[in-house]
Image: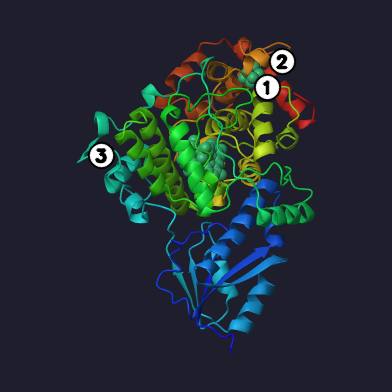
């Protein structure tokens, strides 16, 4: 019997969903699904081992699911690169055409299509998002104007009908953040997320990752593995979030507590980004929990906003502004990433806590990313490309499309203010209010200069002073700049000396 088949559907590691649009309309009898593990691709940067295990294991489980559903799958395990198995596949199957869902990373679809030579390839649209380019682009009054997340979010609420009563938002308000964002109370209980243990396939992948990527960050073992690698298990983890954490998601969304990794966050981003879960099904489930009275509106609205507001906005910003967006550095930040980002070796309790979560789980919740790791990177003028590459390598849910706007835009304000009209810059006051870290820290959150003064404080004022001309007319920063103006010249120079002391120490590789 001939091996020759008509169409090949090429599926990559972040497209493991039966809703993959390249599969739609294909005849199982004449179609082959192609999936390739390329070791060289994963060695391009020091990706966290947990992330590699997740992607490879999801791919292998998805291939098994496809076979069970009657598809023929050519799966190339543990291959050095993409090119050789692709050539083998073409020689064996002699496909007359390829189909592929568009890639999430800028420029990759074109590179993959080029590798196919003369064989035609039909590129189908991405199914892991709810918005269209038209939804976003049509909101721009001129090509150079900006659109806020909030404006886009209203449009997405109307488009999906989520939390809407006709044209009006549930409860009369679009956004309930005023009721959210409480500091951590002493008696608050956080329910631990459900764990999904490793099966034989995941155990094999763990062995492979430990063999090929021994020098990469993190450690993985069969006994400690706890992430879902199938849609079935991811749905169970999602149900656990809706049953046990959604109701209190809002109030403690911004809180940080020593030793607490997940708090009330969903921990589902990695599953959504590889295709195991769809954002719309999660948003609809959250809405149903409000309608059946098991979750408060402020939490449900907050969660839905993250999914159909922020996630969609970030995706659209990426595709509208790439490729030059990645290179932006509006604040001229040029310092090197300090070594402790990799080792976790620092006396700053907030940073060491966030870094320990990342090193162990390849995860830290949003506020640790934004107001601790990100805030420090902003204040210390770390170079955007280095910060972006670090986040991309370290986080289990990290992909180019989501890292670039979050890091270059939201965190570092390096995009000239597209994602945010003002930088998320904060001194130790914020961290002290929203966490219990400062009580356990070597540094004093209340002092700006002196031996034990918290580095966030002097770096904060130094940040405002060195960017004075860029922020002095920003109406959202009036208070911050007025506070800076209120300090005498002598005081400012003393503060900036203190900041310089920390920056120089970091540059010399000394512990701070
Ligand atoms: C510096 C920085 C880097 C980030 N890197 C990533 C990343 O690599 N991958 C990623 O998916 N998210 C990223 N985010 C966004 C957000 O922090 C994570 O989506 C979230 O922490 C994931 O954890 P969770 O599933 O428990 O989310 P929850 O707090 O439960 O939020 C619900 C969902 O909303 C979505 N979401 C919320 N905010 C964003 C956002 N800003 N961008 C995109 N999706 C969002 C996610 O899908 C998330 O699962 C980053 C944010 C910052 C500030
Ligand atoms: S005192 Fe400063 S460095 Fe220490 S935990 Fe608080 S904010 Fe972080």
Residue in front for this viewpoint, 178 or 109: 178
- Secondary structure of the residue carrying tag 3 is strand
The N terminus sits in image quarter: bottom right
Q: Is mark 3 within 8 Å of ligand 1?
A: no
Q: Is mark 1 within 8 Å of ligand 2?
A: yes
**Which residue is under mark 1?**
349
- Secondary structure of the residue carrying tag 1 is helix
- Label 3: how many Cα within 10 Å (few below 14, some 14–19, many 20+): some
Residue displayed at 76% across by 52% down: 213
Q: Are marks 1 and 2 in contact (CB under 8 Å)?
A: yes
Note whether 169 is above or below 64 in the view shown: above
Q: Quadrant of residue 441?
A: top right
Residue 139: image x %, image y %? 31, 47
Residue displayed at 58% across by 52% down: 229
Q: Earlier in the sequence, mark 1 or mark 2?
A: 1
Residue displayed at 60% across by 31% down: 261
Q: Which mark is residue 164?
A: 3
């Amino acid at each position: 019997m001939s091996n020759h088949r008509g169409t090949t559907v090429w599926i990559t590691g972040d497209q493991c969903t039966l809703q993959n649009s390249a599969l739609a309309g294909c005849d199982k009898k004449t179609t082959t699904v192609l999936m390739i593990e390329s070791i060289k691709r994963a060695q391009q940067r020091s990706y966290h081992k947990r992330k590699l295990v997740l992607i490879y294991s999801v791919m292998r489980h998805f291939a098994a699911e496809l076979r069970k559903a009657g598809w023929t799958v050519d799966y190339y395990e543990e291959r050095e690169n993409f090119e050789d198995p692709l050539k083998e596949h073409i020689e064996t199957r002699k496909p007359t055409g390829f189909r592929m869902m568009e890639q999430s990373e800028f420029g990759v679809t074109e590179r993959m299509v080029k590798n196919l030579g003369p064989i035609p390839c039909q590129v189908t649209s991405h199914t892991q998002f709810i918005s269209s380019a038209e939804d976003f682009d049509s909101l721009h009054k001129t090509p150079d104007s900006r659109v806020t997340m909030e404006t886009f979010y209203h449009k997405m609420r109307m488009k999906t009908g989520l939390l809407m009563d006709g044209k009006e938002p549930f409860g009369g308000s679009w956004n309930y953040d005023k009721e959210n964002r409480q500091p951590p109370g002493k008696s608050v209980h956080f329910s631990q997320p459900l764990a999904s243990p490793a099966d034989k396939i995941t155990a094999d992948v763990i062995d492979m990752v430990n063999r090929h990527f021994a020098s990469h960050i993190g450690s993985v073992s069969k006994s400690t593995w706890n992430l879902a690698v199938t849609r079935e298990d991811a749905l169970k983890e999602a149900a656990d979030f809706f049953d046990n954490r959604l109701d209190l998601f809002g109030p403690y969304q911004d809180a940080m507590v020593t030793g607490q990794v997940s708090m009330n966050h969903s921990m589902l981003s990695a599953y959504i980004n590889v295709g195991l879960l769809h954002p719309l099904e999660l948003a609809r489930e959250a809405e149903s929990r409000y309608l059946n009275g098991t979750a408060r509106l402020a939490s449900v609205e907050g969660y839905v906003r993250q999914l159909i507001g922020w996630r969609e906005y970030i995706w659209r910003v990426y595709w509208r502004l790439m490729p030059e967006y990645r290179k932006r550095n509006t604040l001229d930040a040029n310092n090197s990433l300090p070594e402790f980002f990799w080792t976790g070796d620092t006396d700053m309790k907030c940073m060491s806590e966030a870094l320990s979560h990342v090193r162990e789980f390849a995860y830290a919740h949003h506020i640790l990313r934004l107001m601790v790791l990100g805030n420090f990177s902003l204040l210390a003028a770390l170079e955007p490309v280095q910060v972006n590459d670090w986040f991309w390598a370290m986080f289990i849910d990290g992909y180019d499309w989501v890292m670039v706007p979050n890091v270059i835009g939201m965190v570092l304000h390096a995009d000239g203010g597209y994602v945010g009209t003002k930088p998320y810059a904060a001194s130790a006051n914020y961290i002290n209010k929203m966490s219990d870290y400062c009580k356990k820290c070597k540094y004093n959150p209340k002092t700006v200069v002196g031996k034990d003064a918290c580095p966030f404080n002097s770096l904060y004022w130094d940040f405002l002073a060195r960017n004075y001309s860029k922020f002095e007319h920003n109406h959202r920063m009036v208070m911050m700049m007025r506070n800076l103006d209120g300090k005498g010249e002598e005081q400012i120079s003393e503060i900036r000396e203190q900041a310089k002391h920390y920056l120089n120490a970091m540059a010399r590789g000394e512990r701070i």
